Amino acid sequence: MFKALFGRPEGLLVVTFAGWIVLGTLALWLPISQGERAVSLLDCLFTSTSAVCVTGLTTVDTAGAWSRTGHTVILVLIQVGGLGIMTFAAVGARVLRIRFSFSSQAALTGALFDSDARVELRRSVGFIIAFTLIFEALGAAALWLAARFDASLADDPFDAIFHSVSAFCNAGFSVYTDNAIALRGSPLGLATIAVLIILGGLGYTVVIELLARAWKRVSGRGELPLQWSLQTRVVLWMSLLLIVAGAACLGVLGLTARETHIGERIVHASFQSISARTAGFNTLDVAALPVSSLLVLIGLMFIGGSPGSCAGGIKTTSAAVWLARLRARLLSRESVTILRRRVPQEVVRRSALVLSVATLWNLLGVLVLALSESRPDVRFEHLLFEQISAFGTVGLSCNFTPTLSPVGKLWIVLTMFVGRVGPLTLALAVLPKPRPLFQYPSERVMIG
């Protein structure tokens, strides 16, 4: 049974994530990890899942519920989830000089890279580790420097490291009770968090290409390819479009009453547009936003970041392919094209499947939360926001997570897990792969 389970890449990915969640739960349940008040096992499971799945939703106050040991456990879980469980498996096997089987290589490549990314596995894993640690170190130094100039922030190197790792891994965890609201008066702190979120959400294949081109241009070694890869172009254009469009919509539709000046509206609208795509940091009270602005954030959370990154959601490339497919069908074209490149039908079908599974799961989730949280003070948009935030591994909440019932907490735990592992990956891991020996006769039905 063990051999059959780990022989499939999807099963390996699912079980490894689940194993880290269990270990994190037990570590957080220890008295040394908790603060003055004891935290229940269910809340430990919730926090561990949120950390491994780099979500950021919390049922307890992260600042007060956990000791420094508990914060360190959460930090480790965030780093593990952000880098990807498969990366740690690859590094461990490399150190032990263990040869990969074909299925293990497929699992690692599928977890970290696009199937067409022609990057040698071991070299890429080393680059991922180095790139992550270097930028997290630079981010921690910038955040520590920002705290030195802001008396309202604690001048603690651990806080700077924690927030840097949390931002780069798009986790949204904070050791401040009010999350990133404490950074409102620190331009350097907000800019550092925003840059780390963007870098962590681009995807390693895109970062590899960007840095490789920059190195060739600076050093003069090697010839630059005439054309950027379609993956990089789609990711960069979609990321820029979502950030700008999201910020513009939030600025027009309205923020909270605290943002009175135009400068404040631009800064916080831009930051929330960046953060909503799976990071989960908030510089304002999300519950006080108008419904129209919440719907904009829901759309950004549903799309999420890019493949091969720390981000969740259906991914920017899936959204781009689906929109290109819609345009092709409206124009009665057979081929789907993006930026003057034809997208293979296999990729088109995969994007449609991801979008369909994600939509069905979230509709089911809203129904489950509506049944488990049936209280007079619960609003529908808050249920929808909580569900999409968990699925997109974002972490934003309308102050709704701490009030969840035990059934609601368990459902959000499951949703965070599905959102991190991926609906398609989970379906492939759980469902058998049938091999039909016949086909049914075809017949048309009326549409529309």
Image (spheres, grey):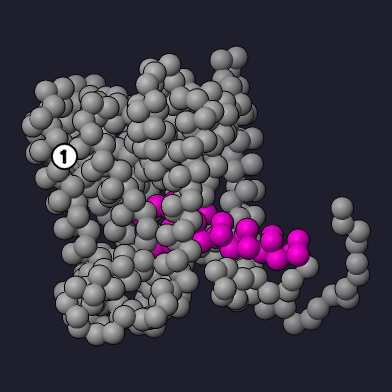
Q: Which residues are magenta?
A: 305-331
Q: Nearer the viewer, residue 396 or 431?
A: 396
* Rendered location of residue 370, percent (x, y): 61, 29
Q: If the image is split into quadrants, where does the N terminus sit? A: bottom left
Q: Nearer the viewer, residue 349 or 412?
A: 349
* Rendered location of residue 132, percent (x, y): 22, 58
Compared with 26, 445 (above or below) is below
Compared with 223, 308 (above or below) is above
Q: Is residue 45 magenta-colored?
A: no
Task: Write down the quadrant of residue 58 in the picture.
Answer: top left
Kind of element beneath mark 1: helix
Residue at which label 1 appears: 143
| Residue occupying image coordinates x 74% and y 71% | 333
Q: Residue 103 vs residue 415: left or right? A: left
Q: Residue 273 vs residue 71: left or right? A: right
Three-letter code for the amino acid on which mark 1 is drawn: Leu
* Rendered location of residue 158, percent (x, y): 12, 39
| Residue occupying image coordinates x 52% and y 54% | 314
Q: Residue 230 vs residue 335: left or right? A: left
Task: Write down the quadrant of residue 259 in the picture.
Answer: top left
* Rendered location of residue 20, percent (x, y): 31, 53
Q: Residue 295 vs residue 447: left or right? A: left
| Residue occupying image coordinates x 88% and y 73% | 442
Q: Is residue 306 magenta-colored?
A: yes
